[in-house]
Image: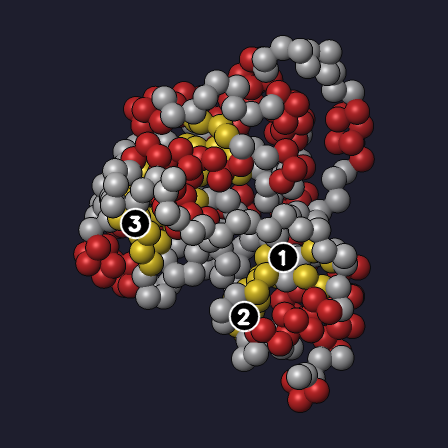
Amino acid sequence: MRQVSLPIYPVTYPTGFRLNQNESQFPVPTRLHEQLSTLSFHDLHEYPVQPIDELFRRYAAYVGVEPNQLLVGCGSDEMIHVVTQALLSPEDVVLSPNPDFALYPIFTTIAHGRHVQTDGLSFDALVSSVEHYAPKLLLLSNPNNPTGKLWTVAELSDLAARVPYLVVDEAYIDFTPDASMISHLDAFPNVIVLRTLSKAFGLANVRLGFMVTTTELAAYFRQFVPPFNISGVSAKIANVFLQDSSYLDEAIAWHAEMRDKWSSLLATIGQVHPAKANFLYVTLDEPELIWSHLATNGIHTSRQSSGIRVTLGTEQALLATKRALMTWSPVSQP
């Protein structure tokens, strides 16, 4: 048995407003509920060949690539797992910015690699760390989770030329698609892009993520994915959303409207970082105290070292948060 000590992700459902997991709060339109109600499940005894084939075609068309450039998995988490297992040898270095997605060091450790992080989120810090650590893999989220910082295509292109492999986790890129690296894969055959339907598409429960890369790398990674690794039920649901021509635009517009409202509210307690995502990051003088105060009032946010990350919630969540903040007083806190 390996001697490891990895954090176990807490699967909890606190009472109140759950603004800590970046789940979409956008209400699914009635027309999609109606379409979902017409799905047939007569084939539950069969392995899901047709629904998955259709999913590959529809998602490839959405992102502008060929189906053979895709892999699909149980959330983009599985795709991170596949990448690290397939590329890393023992003690290979994986570099990420700091802060970034908490699962990167976990999957690196599982794959017997060594995860290191930069000192901060600047481009210069990344370049310096690449030169110092000579990583096998540069793994980062864009927009950054938890801060929302957006790495430019020019910055990522520069970084891609410095490392054997660059993995760009674009979980939130649907909110700002022009910043995606997918259209630059021909120029950078060592770039691997990860995507998900959990955020802008609002399908976290469906658990579908994608890898988008060159046909050569996709063929290599496919060896590490078991057949039928996703549910046909999930694929059928996703296909309904992918074929709706206006759903994503509606979801993005809703988030843009709510982002302005949440930004105005959160600016009353700290520095709000600009972001095009379904969350905002707020730098605070007393993040632990404010996080605890909000949680006590049924507002559950993601606690970070220098602030809190807040999922863009509904009008009801916004009002509840406003009321909770009206009772916030640092002097009165224990």
According to the picture, the residue beneath numbered tag 1 turns out to be: 20
Decide if residue 228 is in sight here: yes
Residue 83, image x and y in percent? 37, 36
C-beta proximity under 8 Å, tags 1 and 3:
no
As rendered, which of 91 and 40 lies closer to the eye?
A: 91
Disc 3 marks which residue?
A: 114
In-front residue for pair 91/38: 91
Q: Residues within 10 Å of mark 1 (few under 14, many from 20)?
A: some
The image quadrant that residue 332 belongs to is bottom right
Task: Name the residue at the bottom extreme.
Answer: 331
The answer to whether mark 3 and mark 2 are in CB contact below 8 A is: no
- Pinpoint residue 293: horizontal percent, then vertical percent: 69, 73
The amino acid pointed to by label 3 is: Arg
Element class at badge 3: strand
Give amino acid for label 2.
Answer: Gly
**3D distance between C-alphas at marks 2 and 1:** 13 Å
For label 2, the residue is: 307
* Location of the N terminus (image quadrant): top left
Please state if 334 lies on the left or on the right of 182 as rendered: right
Determine the residue positioned at 55% across, 49% down. 9
Q: Earlier in the sequence, mark 3 or mark 2?
A: 3
> Is 18 positioned to the left or the right of 59 in the image?
right
Q: Position of residue 87 (x, y in %)?
A: 29, 35
**Label 3 vs label 2, nearer the camera:** 3
